[in-house]
Image: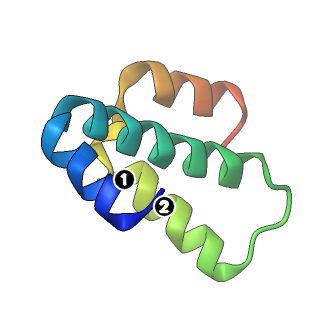
Amino acid sequence: MLSRDRDHFERAYPAAHAFITAANLRREAFALCRMSLRTPWQENRLAELLESAPACREPWFVALVEQDGV
């Protein structure tokens, strides 16, 4: 997506933009959870997402992560 299109999308559809952002953060966190070996940076990023990102603190997502064994 071109930056101009992205900027227009963010202004025109703030709720959709927030949804996509939250979904991307959860996808990143879940992908890191699934890794058997993580670098120190990845460990820090995972902790940051799980502790600080409201999208990753949704009860259904926390249950999914706990079920996966993280």
Residue 11 as seen in the image, left or right of residue 60: left
The single residue placed furthest to the right in the displayed view is 36
Q: Which mark is residue 47?
A: 2
Q: Helix or strand or loop: what does disc 2 sit on?
A: helix
Q: Helix or strand or loop: what does disc 1 sit on?
A: helix
Which quarter shows the C terminus?
Answer: top right
The residue at 58%/42% (across/down) is 27
Tell me the kind of residue under disc 1. Glu
Residue 64, horizontal then vertical, whole percent: 59, 24
Residue 57, horizontal then vertical, whole percent: 36, 36
Residue 53 or 7: which is nearer the viewer? 7
**CA distance separating discs 2 and 1:** 6 Å
| Residue 56 in view | no
The residue at 48%/56% (across/down) is 1
The residue at 20%/34% (across/down) is 13
Residue 38 or 21: which is nearer the viewer? 21
Tell me the kind of residue under disc 2. Ala
Q: Which mark is residue 27?
A: none
The colouring scheme, among rainbow, by chain, secondary structure or one colour, is rainbow
Q: Which residue is mark 1?
A: 51
| Residue 12 in view | yes
